[in-house]
Amino acid sequence: MTDKPKSQPTQVNEDLRAKTATLAEALPYMRLHAGQTLVIKYGGHAMGQEHLALSFARDIVLLKQVGMNPVVVHGGGPQIGKMLDRLKIKSEFVDGLRVTDAATVEIVEMVLSGSINKQIVAAISAAGGKAVGLSGKDAGLIRARRLTRTKKDPGSNIEKLLDLGFVGEPEHVNADVLATLARSDIIPVIAPIGVGPAGETFNINADTVAGAIAGALKAKRLLLLTDVAGVMDKNRKFIPELTVKRTKELIADGTISGGMIPKVETCLNAVNEGVDGAVIMDGRVPNAVLLELFTQPGFGTRISRRGGK
């Protein structure tokens, strides 16, 4: 009696095999983050390029669909600059902050709360999600105060108070507003505009707003999408993870410098307010958010109290 020949395994398309392997790798991380709040600051080239904007919108919708609570905070500096140029309104920067007078703050609010905010909301809706656009003025979401900065006069060595106009910083975040949305299927998209005690409009740095919101919500993650890979050491080598203590040491010895300092300080403040981890990452890479959340190595530089991904 002869044995019947054994049948061969069914051939599977390699592309499909890769997709299922990716899904299997991501599933434990989906479970880990289920029900958690993620605050994502969206800006830079990721917001300015159409294919990256569409990819970002799809990623945010996916996060909501698998049970997470994404909160998007967006910037818009380049778009504000273009609009001011079109209207022939001059603006200047002091220590990286746009001096914002009464005329400028109207344009800032129009661009941030208007065109940019609604473009992101529309992209998320087109990707199958439900989004609502907000600014810090809606429902008293962000109560702000005037930001003060001083600068030392090189001649007299005297500290002088800088007048930045209607540039503000968060004083209080009404977390109840966002907690209500978290219990629904709506994704909040927030423009970094705050309201002062007399009803004034304040222009606030988007990183700062994202950090304040993450701290108020005790978010699982704060993700700052930037135009760099993350934090680098003195040899320009990427650092994947940092503790709060080590981060402060790198600032003190000058390894972290320039424009990276305010981003890192935003992360430190958020972690001090109870955020589990804050990540500085390259938003120019498609699916950057998913790479950080759903893979073992992560994607950016994560700052946390205890370190580790």
Image (cartoon, grey):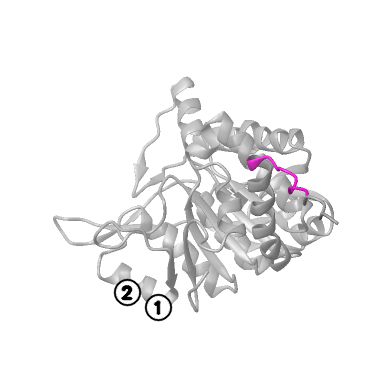
- Tell me, yes or no, if residue 210 can be seen here: yes
Three-letter amino acid code at the position of disc 1: Lys
Three-letter amino acid code at the position of disc 2: Glu
Q: Residue furthest front?
A: 1
Question: Which of 64 and 197 lies nearest the eye of the viewer?
Answer: 64
Between the residue at mark 1 and the residue at mark 2, the CA separation in whole angstroms equals 6 Å
What residue sits 72% from the left and 48% below the top? 62
Give the percent coordinates (x, y) of residue 115. Answer: 63, 30
The answer to if 13 sits in the magenta stretch is yes
Give the percent coordinates (x, y) of residue 280. Answer: 47, 57
Q: Quadrant of the N terminus?
A: bottom right
Up-down relation of residue 110 to residue 187 (above or below) = above
* Residue matched to label 2: 249
- Secondary-structure class at tag 2: helix
**Side (left or right) of 151 relative to 297:** left
Question: Which of 179 and 139 lies nearest the eye of the viewer?
Answer: 179
What residue sits 40% from the left and 29% below the top? 90
* Residue matched to label 1: 245
Question: What segment carries the magenta color?
Answer: 7-14
Q: Residue furthest left?
A: 155
Give the percent coordinates (x, y) of residue 43. Answer: 52, 43
- Secondary-structure class at tag 1: helix
Marks 1 and 2 in Cβ contact (< 8 Å): yes
For the image, the number of numbered tags is 2
Crowding at label 1, few (<14), some or many (≥20) Cα neighbours within 10 Å? Answer: some
- The dominant secondary structure in magenta is loop
Give the percent coordinates (x, y) of residue 72. Answer: 64, 49
Question: Which of 264 and 277 lies nearest the eye of the viewer?
Answer: 277
**Side (left or right) of 164 relative to 123:** left
What residue sits 50% from the left and 26% below the top? 83
